[in-house]
């Protein structure tokens, strides 16, 4: 890795060359604020294209009711998933879901996704509800996820979502941007997750605070869509406001398939065509010579499998340094690493093997679509044969309020994004974060293990 | 306006899971109940002993993690007068301001203040005073000031909607 910190410089020096080069974040916020250009640091009122909420929708409604409105101002922009505690584990949770369904009915919200459909970020991606260049604001901290497709996604609080429902508008500060370049091909067994953990380990959990993280380089171009999602999603743990990966042929192919699926579901034949035109029209790219607060360059060949140790995400170590730590639970899932590619890697590791005695393996696909495809390809069968327990698509035990939480004193290795003390329910448990193949290998070994020594 | 109280001092990267545990986010609702779980996993002595006007002091990246607003409201409901930190995670900062909780970025003061000592904050003069001296903090942005003056985002939006009149309801 090497750091070249550039001053806020200008790519083109001539005076009458027109406006200064812009970052992606500047362009996206200018568009959503209805302005030609916005300066970094300015506070602007933006109108997002999509507003996301999940099991917290009932709590947001309570706040919104104070505005005395009968209808939300932007019903067509709302996207609501039930994902954080599904199926409902207690009557209180069920009551919460019931209130949300009632709100959805009463407001005529069409983008509502029931228990079992999957995790908000995955579902909105699969439904192509967010397109390149657009802005999604979500009552969820992992909303920078949508950088995978070249959209601006940022997490906000519940009151802010309520304010958006009422007015369609919210204040945002135009962030500085950090450029992260990855060149070359990732070595075998090294994934986008390892790259994300390396970045967070190198620069700290606040290394990207307030910033928009723009990725580029041949290493990013080589990544699958699933991997790009994992990378963009993890930027929440870097303190970032949003992230950005340039849309390319892979992005467009994914979105076109998603749009075709949605068109078929909604029996709206023209939708796919219309939206395909939008994909091209809306896309926003950073200008050559735009100013970055910092530029970090990595070469893929020097990366290795990386593990985040208890109790902070930036407490990272190379896999080799923590191999051998005993684990009682291995968990594969979440909006970071619960996708088809992740489950495929895990299935490959466990195929023909058994989960170690004294250890349990929990696999929760990020969505119903992932589950279906994983079934069609035999991944789920391989995992179940090895002794894995399969959960309903959703967040699972990620934030400690649903099944699969650890007992006190237990150690979990997880493909999730956060290992804060108490995250999975009890403060007296340790959480290690790793890529899904490492989690699967650890389940088989009963201790943290390198999948390359197995497969 | 002046805020005065005792300092509850914590370190770097105080995250939302220790401010308000995730397992309570969809079921614990009343103000008192939310207040009673504040900082439960970090400092169980906080919620029973904090007094109105007390200040919470943090290091770098205070409030990192989840977008859960209770991480800020659990402090508000306990009567916390302000949070002073070296830096804030962005969603926590927004949640604090949007709930009328003053969040002050002042690395020098955050480092100098000792746990449980008496601290006062003078908002007009933008000065923090503690045992080891006085520290100036920068002006808040106009947007932030407007929200704090309104008593939070909800109050500000109510004002805006009232100004816009009933015609704005239900339209995009
Ligand atoms: S999987 Fe975990 S991190 Fe992702 S949205 Fe759900 S609770 Fe949040």
Image (cartoon, coloured by chain):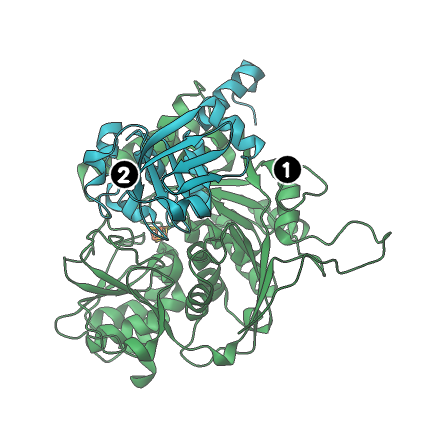
Chain colours: A green, B cyan
Q: SS class of the residue under badge 1?
A: helix
Residue at 35% x, 27% y is: A62
Q: Is residue B69 above or below residue A288?
A: above
Residue at 45% x, 65% y is: A196
Residue nearest the observer in this picture, A217 or B61: B61
Residue A54's x, y, as percent? Answer: 37, 41
Res. A306 visible in picture: yes
From the image, tell me which residue sits under label 1. A33
Q: Quadrant of residue A220?
A: bottom right
Query: How far apart in space, not on screen, are marks 2 and 1 (Cα)?
Result: 33 Å
Q: Quadrant of the C terminus of chain A?
A: bottom left
From the image, tell me which residue sits under label 2. B26
Residue at 78% x, 49% y is: A19
Q: Is residue A438 above or below residue B6?
A: below
Q: SS class of the residue under badge 2?
A: loop
Label 2 with label 1: CB-CB less than 8 Å: no
């Amino acid at each position: 890795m090497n750091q070249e910190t550039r001053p806020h410089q200008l790519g083109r020096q001539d005076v009458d060359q027109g406006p200064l080069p812009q970052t992606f974040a500047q362009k996206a916020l200018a568009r959503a604020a209805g302005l030609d250009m916005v300066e970094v640091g300015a506070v602007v009122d933006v109108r997002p294209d999509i507003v996301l909420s999940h099991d917290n929708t009932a709590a947001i409604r309570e706040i919104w009711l104070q505005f005395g409105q009968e209808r939300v101002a932007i019903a067509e922009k709302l996207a609501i998933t039930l994902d954080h505690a599904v199926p409902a584990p207690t009557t209180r949770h069920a009551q919460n879901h019931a209130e949300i369904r009632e709100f959805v009915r009463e407001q005529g919200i069409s983008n509502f996704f029931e228990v079992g459909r999957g995790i908000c970020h995955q579902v909105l991606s699969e439904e192509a509800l967010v397109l390149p260049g657009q802005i999604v604001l979500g009552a969820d901290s992992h909303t920078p996820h949508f950088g995978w497709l070249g959209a601006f996604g940022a997490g906000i609080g519940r009151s802010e979502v309520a304010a958006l429902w009422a007015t369609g508008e919210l204040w945002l500060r135009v962030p500085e941007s950090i450029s992260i370049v990855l060149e070359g091909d990732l070595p075998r067994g090294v994934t986008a997750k390892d790259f994300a953990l390396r970045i967070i380990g190198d620069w700290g959990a606040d290394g990207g605070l307030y910033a928009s993280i723009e990725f580029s380089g041949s290493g990013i171009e080589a990544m699958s869509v699933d991997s790009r999602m994992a990378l963009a999603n993890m930027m929440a743990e870097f303190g970032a406001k949003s992230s950005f990966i340039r849309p390319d042929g892979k992005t467009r192919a994914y979105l076109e398939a998603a749009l075709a699926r949605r068109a078929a579901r909604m029996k709206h034949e023209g939708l796919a065509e219309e939206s395909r035109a939008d994909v091209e029209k809306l896309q926003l790219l950073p200008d050559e010579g735009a100013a970055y607060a910092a530029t970090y360059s990595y070469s893929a060949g020097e990366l290795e499998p990386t593990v985040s140790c208890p109790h902070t995400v930036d407490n990272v170590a190379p896999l080799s340094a923590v191999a051998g730590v005993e684990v009682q639970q291995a968990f594969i899932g979440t909006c970071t690493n619960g996708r088809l590619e992740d489950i495929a890697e895990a299935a490959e590791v466990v195929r023909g093997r058994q989960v170690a005695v004294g250890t349990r393996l929990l696999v929760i696909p990020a969505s119903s679509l992932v589950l279906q495809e994983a079934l069609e390809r035999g991944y789920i069968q391989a995992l179940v044969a090895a002794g894995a327990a399969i959960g309903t698509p959703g967040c699972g035990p990620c934030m400690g309020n649903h099944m699969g939480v650890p007992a006190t004193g237990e150690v979990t290795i997880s493909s999730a994004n956060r290992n804060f003390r108490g995250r999975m329910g009890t403060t007296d448990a340790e959480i290690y974060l790793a890529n899904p193949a490492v989690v699967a290998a650890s389940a088989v070994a009963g201790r943290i293990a390198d999948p390359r020594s197995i497969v | 306006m002046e805020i005065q109280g005792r300092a509850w001092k914590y370190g770097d990267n105080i995250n939302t899971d220790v401010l308000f545990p995730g397992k309570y986010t969809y079921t614990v609702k009343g103000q008192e109940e939310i207040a009673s779980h504040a900082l439960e996993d970090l400092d169980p002595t906080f919620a029973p002993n904090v007094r109105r006007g007390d200040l919470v002091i943090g290091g770098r990246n205070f409030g990192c993690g989840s977008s859960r607003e209770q991480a800020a409201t659990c402090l508000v409901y306990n009567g916390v007068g302000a949070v002073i930190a070296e830096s804030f995670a962005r969603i926590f900062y927004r949640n604090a301001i949007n709930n009328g909780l003053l969040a002050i970025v002042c690395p020098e003061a955050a480092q100098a203040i000792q746990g449980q000592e008496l601290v006062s904050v003078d908002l007009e003069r933008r000065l923090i005073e503690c045992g080891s001296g006085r520290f100036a903090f920068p002006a808040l942005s106009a947007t932030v000031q407007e929200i704090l003056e309104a008593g939070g985002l909800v109050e500000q939006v109510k004002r805006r909607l009232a100004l816009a009149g009933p015609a704005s309801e239900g339209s995009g």
